[in-house]
Image (spheres, grey):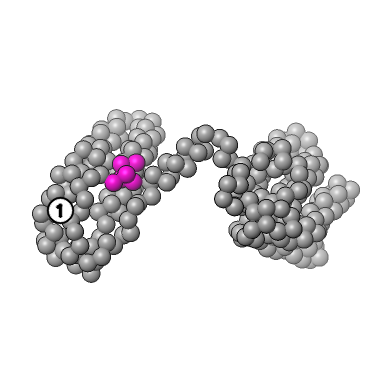
Amino acid sequence: MDWIYLFTSFNGRISRQPFWIGFGILVAVEIAVQRLASQAQGDTLGTILDLAFAYPEFTLGVKRSNDRNLSPWVVGFFFAINVALDLFTLQNGDLDAGNPINEVIAYLFGFFALILLIELGFRRGTSGPNRFGPDPLADGAPTLLGQYSAVRWLNWWLEALKPAEPFFLGDWKTPTYPEELPRSVKYWCITITVVNALILVVESFMLRSIGPTVAFAFLTAIGPINLVLFWRHAVRYLNRNASALRAAARLPAKPSIEWCAIFALLATPLLMTIFAL
């Protein structure tokens, strides 16, 4: 699947991911162009641009309705109303907002747009092939962004951040915590360290002080980096004091140390932001 197909073709099916990507791109470009147009030529050129963007938006909606196994006429009816309103605006100027009839039309059109957005943007397509083509989410089906190595790397990183065990591991009689550093904790340490560094670089510029930088060095030393370096020693300590930990926690089941470490790491950016404020 390519970008030309995404924005020009009415054939086939697309899943929610490429729909939202294409929709976001079109909306962002349309807003930027319309702002420039309103400064230069007024609302007339903005309406013309809205008409120009109707075609790629229509192709997105049709392919998504195909995935939902809906009639393309549903999407076509919505865009026909949109084009008719734009053409009416070009001929007669903006609609009178104080006219009750115009208000009713605006509310009905907005409600129709909301229903259509929920249907196309949030609901999964039909499983398996339908009359419009094969399932875009079937195993081995090409994805719009999967062709880029950066996206594949990002997906791999997100998978690495997922904990490998549930939050509760059963009763306290289960075996001791493993001493090997979990993969997810290692990658969360790297991610949170980068996030904290970015936060405090921004705060240093805003406050014009080296205080945030010093705080970053201190909190990193007792936070993510320290967690990586001394994970084995910390787990050994917890295993030696399992009974005391059970009494202090007062939990019916044994919590996952992997999840607890991730929650502690996620708290550090919040603490740094509070420190700066």
Residue 268 in which image quadrant: top left
Residue 41 in which image quadrant: top right
- Is residue 161 in view? yes
Q: How many marks?
A: 1
Q: Could you tell me which residue is drawn at 50 percent across and 38 percent down?
A: 152
> Residue 198 or 151: which is nearer the viewer?
151
Quadrant into which the C terminus falls: top left
Quadrant into which the N terminus falls: top right
Q: Could you tell me which residue is drawn at 59 percent across and 52 percent down?
A: 138
Q: Could you tell me which residue is drawn at 17 percent across and 49 percent down?
A: 235
Element on which disc 1 rests = helix
Q: Amino acid at mark 1?
A: Leu
> Residue 137 or 63: which is nearer the viewer?
137
Taking the view exactly as shown, the residue that stands out farthest to the right is: 91
- Is residue 43 in view? no
Query: Is residue 184 in the magenta section?
Result: yes
Q: Which residue is mark 1?
A: 238
In the rendered image, the vertical position of residue 203 relative to residue 241, given as above or below: above
> Residue 80 or 21: which is nearer the viewer?
21
Q: Residues within 10 Å of mark 1 (few under 14, many from 20)?
A: some
Looking at the picture, how far across and down is residue 93, in whole percent?
Answer: 84, 49
**Which contiguous range is marked in magenta?**
182-187
Looking at the picture, how far across and down is residue 215, in whole percent?
Answer: 26, 36
Looking at the picture, how far across and down is residue 7, in whole percent?
Answer: 72, 42
Query: Is residue 74 in the magenta section?
Result: no
In the rendered image, the vertical position of residue 191 relative to residue 91, given as above or below: above
Taking the view exactly as shown, the residue that stands out farthest to the bottom is: 252
Q: Could you tell me which residue is drawn at 42 percent across and 46 percent down?
A: 159
Looking at the picture, how far across and down is residue 72, in whole percent?
Answer: 78, 57
Label the magenta part by its dominant secondary structure. helix
